[in-house]
């Protein structure tokens, strides 16, 4: 599996966490058990998910601060999941270049969300990065 596919799977895992309102290691383990063993990207998927859980409040605060008054629960779940993966990568997984994370987030939005989502995600990430 390539990192691009692993990022999609990480986004799907975080989406599942949001839908079930379960941000635990149990959901990570159940989800990852459905991925074929031996795949090197499982480590990346687990790292994104556990790092997100550890930093959820901070990541969500960054999103909410730049969402122009929108509360987290009003943001489309797919868009929210994409933003969470990207912000987790940018601020907590420094081996991934920021521009790669932003570009991949925009590509995920084009694949999985609405026509306006890529612009929304780009705007939120740009605002967050501008501040830091």
Image (spheres, rainbow, N blue to C red):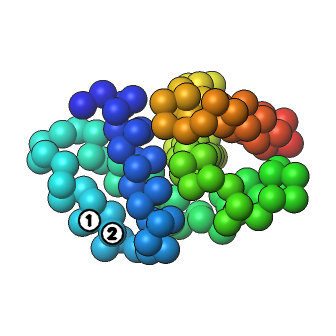
Question: Residue 101: which quarter of the image?
Answer: top right
Task: Name the one closer to the observer, 107 or 61.
Answer: 107
Task: Return the mark for residue 76.
Answer: none
Q: If the image is split into quadrants, where does the C terminus sit?
A: top right
Q: Residue furthest left?
A: 37
Q: Is residue 4 above or below residue 19?
A: above
* Residue found 48% across the figure and 30% down from its top: 111
Specify whether 75 is left or right of 64: left
- Rendered residue at 55%/38% (across/down): 113
Residue that mark 2 sits on: 27
Residue 110 is situated, as x and y percent measured from the top left of the image, at: 55, 28
Quarter of the image containing the N terminus? top left
Compared with 112, 81 (above or below) is below
Location of residue 96 in the rendering, given as x and y in whole percent from the top left corner: 51, 33
**Secondary-structure class at tag 1:** helix
Report which residue position mark 1 lands on: 29
Left/right of residue 73 with respect to residue 112 in the rendered view = right
Q: Are marks 2 and 1 in contact (CB under 8 Å)?
A: yes
Question: In which quarter of the view is residue 128 placed?
Answer: top right
Residue 120 sits in quarter: top right
Q: Is residue 36 left or right of residue 127?
A: left
Q: Which secondary structure lies at badge 2? A: helix
What residue appears at the point 12 percent right and 47 percent down from the top-left corner?
A: 37
The picture places residue 49, in percent across and down from the top left corner, at 43, 57
Using a 10 Å C-alpha cutoff, classify the residue at mark 2 as few (fewer than 14 neighbours), some (14 to 19) or many (20 or more). some
């Amino acid at each position: 599996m390539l990192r691009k596919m692993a990022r999609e799977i990480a986004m799907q895992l975080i989406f599942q966490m949001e839908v079930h309102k379960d941000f635990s290691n149990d959901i990570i383990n159940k989800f990852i058990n459905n991925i074929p063993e031996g795949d090197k990207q499982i480590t990346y998927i687990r790292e994104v998910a556990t790092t997100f859980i550890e930093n959820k409040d901070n990541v969500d605060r960054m999103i909410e601060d730049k969402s122009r008054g929108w509360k987290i629960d009003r943001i489309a779940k797919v868009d929210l999941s994409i933003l969470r993966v990207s912000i987790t990568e940018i601020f907590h997984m420094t081996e991934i270049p920021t521009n790669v994370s932003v570009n991949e987030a925009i590509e995920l939005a084009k694949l999985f969300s609405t026509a306006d989502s890529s612009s929304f995600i780009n705007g939120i990430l740009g605002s967050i990065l501008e501040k830091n």
